[in-house]
Amino acid sequence: MIMRRLTYLFLSVATAFSVAAREHITIANDEFSLGISPDGLVKSLVYLPTGEECLAPGVDIPVSVITQYRPYDNENFLMFPAKPRSFPSNKASMSGDTLILEFADTYDIAKIKVDVKPGYIGFNFIDRDYRIEDYGVKRKTELDEFTLLQLPLRPRERFGEWLNIMWDDSVAVALVGTAPTTFIDSRVERDNTTLLAQTQTAVRLYDSGAALFVTRPDSVLSRMDAIEADFDMPRGVQSRLSDDYLKSYYELRDVTLDNIDHNIELARKAGLKTMVVYYPDFAMACGHFEWRPEYPRGMADLKEICDRIRRAGMIPGIHIHYSKMAVTDPYINDGTPDRRGAVVSRYTLSRPISAQADTIFVEELPENIRMEEGRRLLQLDDELIMFDSVIKDYPYAFVGCKRGYYNSAAAPHSAMSEMRHLDVDDWPLFIRLDQNTGIQREIARRLGDIYADCGFRFVYFDGAEDVPMPYWYNVSRSQLEVYNAMHPAPLFAEGAQKSHFGWHILSRGNAFDIFPPERIRTAMKRYTLRCARQVACDFTSVNFGWVNYLAPSDKTIGMQPDMFDYICSKALAWDSPISLVANVPEIDSHPRTDDNLLTINLWETLKLDKSLDPDLKEALRDPDREFTILPRKGGRVEIFEVSQLTPDSLNASIPVRAFTSRLSDSRTAIIYWDIRGASHLTLPAANARITLQSVDGKTIKLKRDRDGSYIIPTDSRRVLIVDLPEAEASELFNQAISTYKPNHINE
C-alpha cells in the first residue's frame, strides 16, 4: 500500500492511465486518482496529497449505466416488463486514452474518451459499438440515456447541488458538465451522495461530456476557470472574482430621459453603483421589442439614458423577458400568428369546421389541458382560438370556442388538420417559445443589438422558467443563446431559474419576488437567507431583493430603516448584492427616505470595502440577530446589535418604531423614529442621565417641560442614550410612546 501511494504521488499526465492484470484501471493526474475495477465498478477516488479516499466505504456501483425506456433487445423484451430498465457496466478496459465499457444484458460497447489535465479529468462519450450474435432475432437497439460516470461519495459538511460539488474544509469533489447538453444530477442516499453525469438521446447522446476534479476548497474556482476556458463556456468564475460582483443595483421603473437624472441622484444617496433598466419601460412588448412612444428616438433615447448612468459612475444593466413572446407583439397579433410557440399538446380534427363553428371535434382525448383564464389558447393554421371547456367523453371536443382571437382571422378548416394547444405562460400575457426552432435565436439577436448599442454591461434573465421540457437543458439553453449574443460578455448575470450549466451564466444566482414590508423578515428567513446559505455551497451569492420601496399608507407601514438594516446586513454577511425597486413617487413621498437611503449606503459601502471583522460578519449571518449601522466622524461607521421594542402593526395608533441596544450593564441606546412624519414624545423625568443624538453621533440639546420631563422629537431617526439597564430604559421609553403627539416641533 505504501508503494502504491508513492506511485500515485509521482504520477504525471503522460502516465495517467494504468492497468495491471486483475487490478483496477487507474485514471489519474497529479491531484487525484480514479480506480475502476475490470468488472466495471467504481472502486476508489483518492485525493493524492493526503491519500484521503473520497468514496463512501462499502458502496459498489457501476461506473456507467445504459437506460432504455423499455427493453429493446428481442430476447430482453420477451423477458422483462415494458418499463424503463437500466443495464449496469460489467466490464471495463482501457485502450490508449479511451475507456471501453460493456454492460449486463445488452450488446452495447461504450467508448469514453478520457482527457487528463492538470486540474481536472474530462470524460466524453464519443462512440458506441454493438455486438450482434448469430442466433436469435438481433439488431442494434436504441439507447435513451447513458450515464457517463457516477461516483458514490462519502458525506461531507457541504453539498452544492447546483454546481454538483461535495466539500468540506479539507477537500472538494465535483463532477460538472462540459456542455449544456450534459445532464448533471445527484442521488442523496443514507450513507453516500452519488454524483452522476449523463447524456440523453432526446438532447444529444454523443460529445456531451463531464469533468471531474478533486482539490482543496480554495482551488475550486481555479479548477472551474480552467474548465470554462478549455470548453469555451461563459466565464462564471471571472465574474464571481470581479470587483463589480458585490455591487447592488437600483432597479428603474418608468424611466425616461425626463426622470433619469432624479433616479441617478436617489441611487447615489443609497450608495448603489449599478442601475437596471426594465424592458417594459422602453419596449411595447417582448418579442420584437418595438419602441414605446415615450422613446420617440428609439435606440438613441435608451442609449442616452445608459450614457447618463455611466457618466454618473454607475454600471447600466438590463432586465429582460427573452424566452417568450407577448400576445400583443407582432409575433402573435399581426394577423398571421407565428407557428414557433411552444406546444402543450396536439390534436387532430375529426370533423371539418366552418369559420363560425364554436365546437371543435378532435380524435384525441383532451387530457393535457391548461384551463386557467387566458391559457386556453389553440392554434389552427393561422387562426388563434380561445375555448371555454372540453368534452372528455367520446366524441372528444373543445367547446365554447371564440374564433379569430388576437387579431387572427376565423377560417374553415378541414378534417385531419393539426390543432396545437399553445403553451401560454402562467402569467397569460405571453406564449413560451419552442426552443427547437430558430425564434429564440431571432430574439437573442434583437436583444444583443440593444445590449451592445446602448452599452449595457449585465443582465437579469427574468422568466427563465418559461421554457418547455426538458427543463434541465432548455433553461440554460435559452439563456446561453441570449448570453452569446451580448457583446461584450455580461460582467455578471442573474435569473429566475437556474440549471446546472447555468452556473457559468448566472454568476449571482437570483432575486426573489417582492415581499410586503410587514412580512419581509419572515420571508427573508424562509427564502432568501435559506437560499444564501444553500448557494454559498455552490461558490455563489444570491440577490437580497427585489426590495420594493413603499411609503406608509393605509395599506402598509412602508419600508423602514430597520428593514433595510436587516436586508443589507444579511446581504453583507453573505457577500451578496441587494436590488432596490425604484418606485420614485413612493420614494419622494416617504417621510423617512433620507434615513432609508443612508442605511442602504452605509451597509453597501462597508460591504464593498471588504473590511468587516470576520467574527462580526459571522454574527450577522444569524437570522434572529439584528443590527443597525450608524455613521461616525471621518467616514467611520459603528454597528450595534439591537432588539425591537415596538411591534410591527399597520393599525398601531402610535406610529413610532424603536429598537434598543445594550451599551453596557447600565447604559442603553434607543434608536427610534416616526414612520409617518414629524411628531414628539414626552419622556418622564428619571434618576438617570438622558442624552439625545443624531444618527451621526452629534449631541442634540433636549428641551424640558415644566414638570422636568423631556420633549423628544421624532421627526427623523434619532438615538436616545439612557443611563439605565435595557429593561428599565425600555419601560421608560414605552411610557414616552404613550404621549405621542403628531405635531411638528421647531427645534
Image: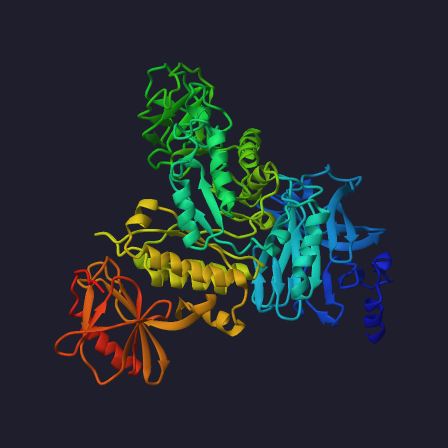
The one nearer the camera, 186 or 493, is 493
Q: Quadrant of the N terminus?
A: bottom right
Residue 263, position in %: x, y? 40, 45
The residue lying at 39 percent from left, 63 percent from top is: 565
In the figure, 744 relative to 279: above or below? below
The one nearer the camera, 98 or 652, is 652
The residue lying at 60 percent from left, 65 percent from top is: 192
In the figure, 716 relative to 250: above or below? below
Quarter of the image where one finds residue 26? bottom right
Residue sticking out furthest to the left: 706
Quarter of the image where one finds residue 202? top right
In the figure, 403 relative to 710: above or below? above
Residue 539, position in %: x, y? 58, 59
In the picture, measured across the screen, residue 627 lies left or right of residue 192, that is left
Question: Is residue 11 visible to us here?
Answer: yes
In the figure, 262 relative to 732: above or below? above
The one nearer the camera, 347 or 265, is 265
Q: Quadrant of the C terminus?
A: bottom left
Question: Is residue 621 visible to us here?
Answer: no
Q: How is the image coloured?
A: rainbow
Residue 581, position in %: x, y? 39, 48
Residue 229, position in %: x, y? 71, 48
In the picture, measured across the screen, residue 391 lies left or right of residue 132, that is left
